Image (tube, rainbow, N blue to C red):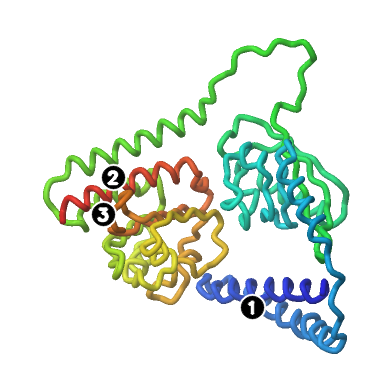
Amino acid sequence: MAQTDEFGEDLADFVRRVAELKASRSVPPDDLPTVLDAAIFELDHVADQLWPWFQRLSSDNPSGAASVDRQEQQLLKALFQRVPVPVALVDRETVVRRLNFAATAFTGVRAGYATGRPLTGFLAHADRAAFRSQAAAVARGEGDRGLTVHLQQQPSVPVRATLTALRPSGEPRTAVLVVLQPGDFQGSSEGTVPGPAMPNLSETTRHAALMDLVDAMTTALLSASGGDRSAVLARAAGVLHGRFADWVVADAGAARPSRTTVLGPPERAEEVAAVAGQDPAACPLVVEAARGGSTALQVRPEDPDAFGRDTSGAPVLVRANVTSLLCVPLTTESGPVRGVLTLFRSGARLAFSMAEAQAMDMMSRHIALAMARLN
């Protein structure tokens, strides 16, 4: 049974890599030889590894595994959740499988939201590569590791992360248990009286910038006279473009959304025109936001087709080099969805944070109210 699960995971990884190769067709011609080499490598992997593996599994017909003591499993789960120390269980790629109660309180992230997302997404950008590298080493069996990281919501507070390997019963892969301990572990002598806390100037600056953005949006909406819903969306997109996002895509309506505004980098007029000509009904993120009314925040989006393809047939997220995105429905607490705003950040720009997503959610309600006045 364990071999079957491992084969399924390997096959799923192969399918994801094939999707990435398909999305790479839009890369510049000079880079195509590298993509071709990768495609040939994947074909060799199927012929030399996956197919013989499948044949062995088909011929072996393994018997069912022994039954697991359910009461003991429930007890272990309860112990994990009630441990008073913040603990997370992640895989070798740092994707969260479980987060206990103390960890949710410590990180400020709900367990339901964190599960299935990389734990590195909640760390400061500078710490992510090191954390991924150490987690992979632990999963490979190279021993326990520890490092100091910083949470994205509190970048000034050092957090000691201790990583140890764990092999859950009945599972083929090694997991990584992460224990988070707050505090400055550089150490100070005992008995030293701590001085007054210094203000976090960088966090204060980011908060002030968000407040300025909210003020600019409110001013733009209140000072506008006349126009229609498309004009409201255009004004809102103008406020957000540049200072908050590299790309702003506005779609009006919910049942049959229509693209009204696309703002992107000035030097990429051709790509902007291709996105403007896209049918928003072919954008899964837009359709989901319009129907469900829920905000989507993605860092390093995994699915290249999450925002569909532009008029040239290339995935929008690949062509725009999107590193993080926000897809926000425009709705009030009790009203219908009146449109969808999608924001992209690309290149080396910092990813959208949860605080920025919360501010954008507030502004989306203001935009929806301004659109509702034009009924």
**Sequence-first disc among 2 and 3:** 3
Which three-letter amino acid code belongs to the residue tagged 2?
His
Residue 322 vertical placement versus 220 (above, below)? below
| Amino acid type assigned to the residue bearing label 3 in the image | Leu
- Residue nearest the viewer, comparing 79 with 275: 79
Task: Return the mark for residue 25.
Answer: none
Question: What label sits on residue 233 in the rendered view?
Answer: 3
Residues at marks 3 and 1, CA–CA distance in whole angstroms: 42 Å
**Sequence-first disc among 3 and 1:** 1
Disc 3 crowd rating (10 Å Cα; few below 14, some 14-19, many 20+) is: many
Q: Secondary structure at mark 2?
A: helix
Element marked by disc 3: helix
User: Mark on residue 366?
Assistant: 2
- Name which quarter of the figure residue 3 lies in: bottom right
Query: Which of the image's four quarters has the C terminus?
Result: bottom left
Contact, CB < 8 Å: mark 2 with mark 3?
A: no
Category of crowding for the residue at label 2, using alpha-carbon neighbours closer than 10 angstroms: few (below 14), some (14–19), many (at least 20): many
Q: What residue is rendered at 68% in x and 45% in y?
A: 100
Which mark lies nearer to you, 2 or 1?
A: 2
Q: Is residue 34 visible from the viewing direction of this image?
A: no
Mark in front: 2 vs 3: 2
Position above or below: 56 against 261: below
Disc 2 to disc 3, how far (Cα)? 11 Å
Q: Quadrant of the N terminus?
A: bottom right
Q: Residue furthest front?
A: 71
Amino acid type assigned to the residue bearing label 1 in the image: Leu
Measured in 3D between alpha carbons, the distance from the residue under mark 2 to the one under mark 1, in whole angstroms, is 48 Å
Residue 351 percent location from the top left of the image = 52, 48
Which residue bears the numbered disc 1? 36
Residue 82 in picture, x, y percent from top left:
72, 41
Relative horizontal placement of residue 264, taking residue 24 as reference (left or right): left
